[in-house]
Image (cartoon, rainbow, N blue to C red):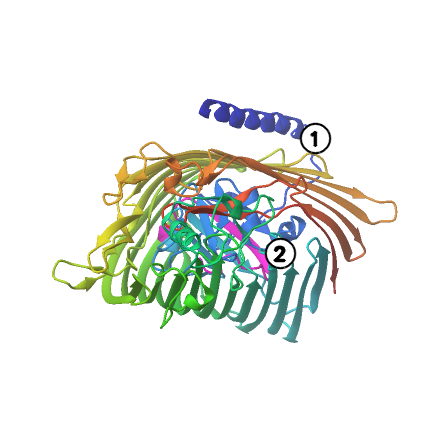
Amino acid sequence: MRHSRISRLFGAAGALLLGLSVVQTASAQAELEEIIVTAQKREQSLQDVPVAVTAFTSEELADRTISNLFSIADSTPNLQIGTSGTGSQNAIVFIRGIGQTSNRVNLDQGVGTYVDGIYRTNVWGGLFDLLDVERIEVLRGPQGTLYGKNALGGAINVISRRPNTAETGGEVSVAVGSFSRIDARASVNIPLIQDQLAIQLSAISRNADGYIETPNDLDFGSQDNTGFRIAALWNLSDTATWLLSADQMRTDSNGSPIYHAWVNPNARLPAQYNALVDGGHIPGPRYAESSIATDPLSSNATDPLARNKTDQESVTSRLEFEFGAATIVSLTSFKTYETSDGFDADGSVLEVSNNRRWLDGETFSQEFQLNGVYLQDRLNLTTGVYYLRDELDFGAAAGNSNSAIPFVGIVPRIRDYNTGNSIQQDLDSYAFYASGTYSLTERARVTLGLRYMNEEKSQASSSTRGRSTRPATVSASAKGDWSNTSPRVSLEYDLNDATMLYVTAAQAFKSGGIGDTVLRDSQGNNFLLPFNEETLWSYEVGMKADWADGRVRANLAAFFMDYEDLHVRTTLFDPNSGSQVRTFFNAGSAEASGLEAEISALASDRFVIQASIGFLDTQYNEDVIDEFRGDVLLVVGEALPFAPELSYSLSAIYSAPLANGHELRLRADYSWRDELLWDATGAVDERDGEDSYGLLNVSATYEFERWSLTAFGRNVTDEIYDMNGFVNSRVVGANWRQRGRPAEWGLRATAPF
């Protein structure tokens, strides 16, 4: 099996290289556009950065009909993005097999997401809509030195468009499509003082019906999203600028597109429910296989409170001062967020298990950067200090009727199932970093970087479990602190003016934390169990090249990563309630290696080909056993979650000038990924994963004068696939999955002014 996949990989690569030989014989009348990125905290050409980076410009995002972060994974090597848990806006992000499957708020992620340089502290609301974006950069491989904690797998940078102090302008876009979709975007730029002060207003609205049908017409997967942003750019002087922005994003949907693939009527809750039905205590029917819908776009879940809502507001200030060859940057941000979700855990028309979760929080961050060029322009140096404060309040509850939430003075239908927990957590994080690139010769450069970080977490948790007629609520609090030093070393060598080779060794880490389950020791004291940070070392070689007079661009990378002290969830016995409880601990190690290639080519002045390939080989290095249950948590030799062995994409864009001076642009994008696991337990339960699948998107754009009209289709072959899932065979007795969007068609009109 693995041999066949490797053969397919190199077969595809060979076909691409053969195509390149044809391109290089074409006449050199045009070249690929240079892409400027800020992956190393300063502006550089994409081809000069010794990091594996995929960059999407605003024009390409529009051309691909990408409206949020989810779809960028289709054309980025070894990037997987899914939805987390029950929240349709909650993100699961993996790069090169490194990420985090859980969306628990006390567990950090393995890939950092940044908006205008500001770190997003958790996955809730992470699949936000793109609002007036200039560029998205996906950095693959650990980025601990410049980006800090939780960037083991890499980082995603979202850069917003800046106001223009010279020209008035704007754009309006409206789209209609399948599932009663109506989307609208608008932006306007207004110089208030010519060349000195400008404001920019941007707004977005996305609305669509759900695509998973339910018996009570609360179709899952609906969208009701709005966003607003105002930004002001003030050129204080020739050497000082101030960019101030404020934004708000809100989402509301009927629930995540969840359905249940199978049930186990003999699991604890279904067995109790069926016993009550059989005894005549509650009306039927029984909970059984027939409770699960068979239509691929339907679910028998009927929980009327299965809604997902998010409300995020933030203010960001960026002050820049130039002093000769140096620039000082002050980056300040304050953000508040509120989100909630709910879902029918049993997935049937019966009230066996309904879940609710909610999260409120606020985040403040302050960063000072110093960027400069020294030693007769031979040294580029970036240094900085960073502070982050995050406060959150989380609650979760599960029961078998709507009235069982929040379990106060309630006698639900199944007496032995009422649980809930809450978390209040405060985080203080400090960091100091420096990274310098020194030119050894005209062709050779070396980069040395180092980041020191220290953070403290304090957490109070309470858990309600046991018989709901006399619920047992236990509480505890704990503090923890962790520190880490993340180095980076990189060597670059220019073979010629168009080809650069690099080799890099880097370390990154993911924060430690405090378990959310209240435990009790032998002396009868309640406590919370802390766990330490994860660490990862990566070794990478790569090449970046522009060939055929700039008509062909090829970026290649090969890597090996050593991953230690993984965060693993296990089961413990709690004498306080006589029940099993779940918590996290550090155990095991893993490794990952792979290859990546991104190629763009101007086959002619009208025809562009883009391709990307990612090959990934991941495995756990040891078995880890749940000592209480006897479950296998990690299986030696098995693949990590969200780590398909092969993923690739191919795009073709053809532009045809018309006789009337207008233009027709045709585009097709195909992406493929191999089968993958959703969780480490997928190694022992094949239901905890997804088979291979491919997606095809197409569009046709007619441009006339300054207007454009685009007809588009996404997943036009109507591929049936799942984005994530979870197996709960013992308690709820079900395997819920999140269905991907089916075929969708639409029409979009765009008018600049």
Q: Residues within 10 Å of mark 1 (few under 14, many from 20)?
A: some
Quadrant containing the C terminus in the rendered view: bottom right
**Residue sitting at x 40%, y 65%:** 412
Foreground: 217 or 168? 217
Res. 708 mark: none
Specify the quadrant of the image occupied by residue 456: bottom left
Q: Earlier in the sequence, mark 1 or mark 2?
A: 1
Residue extending farthest to the left is 523
Distance (Cα) linking label 1 and label 2: 48 Å
Amino acid bearing label 2: Gly
Is residue 679 shown in magenta?
A: no
Q: Residue 496: in sight, yes or no? A: no
Foreground: 320 or 18? 18
Residue extending farthest to the front is 280
Query: Residue 453: x, y in percent?
Result: 29, 58
Circle 2 residue: 210
Q: Which residues are magenta?
A: 123-145
Circle 1 residue: 26
Above/below status of 483 relative to 164: above
Is 497 left or right of 399, judged from the image as shown? right
Do tag 1 and tag 2 residues touch (Cβ < 8 Å)?
no
**Residue sitting at x 50%, y 61%:** 116
Q: Residue 92: in sight, yes or no? A: yes
Above/below status of 274 relative to 502: below
**Residue sitting at x 34%, y 31%:** 637
**Residue sitting at x 36%, y 72%:** 408
Foreground: 398 or 641? 398
Query: Residue 153: x, y in percent?
Result: 40, 46
